[in-house]
């Protein structure tokens, strides 16, 4: 079965092997050397001044950022489940909240952000997804963050990059906290979350905001290559192994280029057989298709063609399917996926199979990458 869900993503063989080594104690020079290497590589991938790694899923890092950076009021963008989650976190940890809500195919509007800031001069934190995974949407994070900083550089910009870090280069000029997790583009098992921080964010982080997610104490420890509590040792070993694998295949630049080419080719192939892409501004992390037969297509792919792709949640349940583009995906696997979707259309009697999806996929991918 090909795992083509936008998280978790498949873990490469070399990474699984690296994580099969005997357990190390975390308070040892051996592990601290491994931690240091992972920390430096993560900091380079983020392109930021500081990095904190937490033993938690991605949501823990979102919560840590809200708790440690927001003191008065948060402005959150809700164009889907994960944006909604920022609002739920803010409420759960007792922060005041202004939420801008959109349909799941619609990116945040800069004008709405401008108005919200005018109406709420006490907003000190802005939370947004780079890529909102609920509908495969890319938000105009860079433009909104630049505007916010031009109005008030003290407002902390928290960007959830869980399906964007390792997918495309992100301009971090106006971002204070960039969150990611192990099980998306970094192709690790779930359980490790990482936060890239600006030096301004590091200055702002309060003391004792929370016990477990206390970023001040984590920064103090992690600068010494250790963690406040037991580190996720196995996942950090795996993190170095995935960085090795990424370097072997041309480094981050090649990963970004291949992801872009695959995402474009998948979109072109599916459009060529009559599908429409759901979001108005699609993210590169996944290809999201809205279709009345979404559930039937997904079932055929799983049961007949050996491909596990994701459906939709809440009001999009049964209405969309999402094909992962994150990670080191062999191009022939992606070609197989669009071919399988075309076969499923023939099974449903919608369109005779003639290999169009595969042809368009290959034309787009290989023409694009040879130019
Ligand atoms: C997967 C994901 C998360 C985090 O989910 P966890 O299950 O807590 O790891 C957060 N934001 C986005 C955009 C995601 O895709």
Image: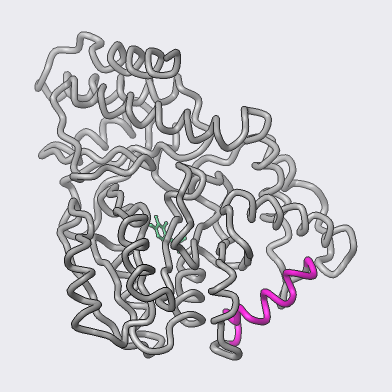
Q: Classify the position of the N terminus by image quarter.
A: top left
Relative image position of residue 361 (x, y in whole percent) = 32, 18
What residue sits 62% from the left and 35% below the top? 246
What residue sits 36% from the left and 14% below the top? 362
Spot the residue most to the front. 150
Relative image position of residue 143 (x, y in whole percent) = 32, 56
Q: Give the range drawn in magenta.
A: 211-225
Compared with 152, 138 (above or below) is: above
Q: Classify the position of the C terminus by image quarter.
A: top left
From the viewer's perspective, tell me whether residue 114 is left or right of residue 25.
left
Residue 174 falls in image quadrant: bottom left
Residue 146 falls in image quadrant: bottom left
**In this orientation, which residue lies closer to the viewer: 298 or 45?**
45
Tell whether position 370 is magenta: no
Compared with 25, 184 (above or below) is: above
What residue sits 29% from the left and 63% below the top? 81
Q: Quadrant of ligand 1?
A: bottom left
């Amino acid at each position: 079965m090909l795992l083509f869900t936008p998280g978790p993503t498949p873990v490469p063989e070399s990474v699984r092997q690296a994580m099969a080594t005997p357990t190390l104690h975390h308070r040892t020079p051996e592990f601290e050397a491994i931690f240091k290497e992972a920390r430096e590589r993560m900091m380079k991938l983020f392109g930021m001044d500081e990095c904190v790694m937490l033993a938690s899923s991605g949501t823990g890092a979102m919560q840590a950022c809200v708790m440690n950076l927001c003191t008065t009021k948060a402005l959150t963008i809700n164009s889907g489940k994960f944006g909604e989650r920022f609002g739920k976190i803010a409420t759960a940890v007792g922060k005041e909240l202004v939420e801008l809500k959109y349909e799941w195919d619609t990116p945040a509007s800069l004008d709405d952000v401008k108005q919200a800031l005018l109406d709420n001069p006490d907003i000190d934190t802005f939370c947004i997804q780079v890529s909102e995974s609920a509908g495969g949407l890319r938000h105009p994070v860079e433009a909104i963050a630049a505007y916010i900083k031009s109005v008030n550089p003290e407002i902390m910009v928290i960007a959830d990059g869980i399906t964007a870090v390792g997918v495309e280069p992100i301009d971090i000029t106006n971002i204070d906290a960039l969150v990611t997790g192990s099980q998306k583009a970094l192709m690790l098992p779930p359980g490790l979350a990482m936060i890239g921080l600006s030096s301004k964010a590091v200055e702002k982080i309060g003391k004792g905001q929370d016990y477990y997610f206390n970023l001040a104490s984590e920064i103090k420890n992690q600068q010494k290559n250790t963690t406040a509590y037991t580190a996720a040792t196995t996942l950090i070993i795996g993190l170095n192994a995935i960085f090795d694998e990424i370097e072997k295949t041309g480094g981050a630049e090649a990963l970004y280029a291949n992801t872009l080419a695959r995402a474009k080719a998948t979109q072109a192939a599916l459009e060529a057989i009559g599908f429409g892409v759901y979001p108005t501004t699609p993210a590169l992390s996944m290809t999201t298709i809205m279709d009345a037969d979404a559930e039937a297509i997904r079932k055929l792919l799983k049961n007949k063609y050996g491909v596990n792709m994701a459906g939709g949640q809440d009001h999009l349940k049964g209405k969309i399917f999402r094909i992962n583009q994150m990670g080191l995906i062999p191009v022939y696997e992606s070609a197989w996926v669009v071919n399988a979707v075309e076969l499923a259309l023939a099974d449903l009697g919608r369109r005779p199979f003639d290999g169009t999806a595969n042809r368009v996929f290959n034309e787009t991918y290989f023409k694009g990458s040879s130019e």
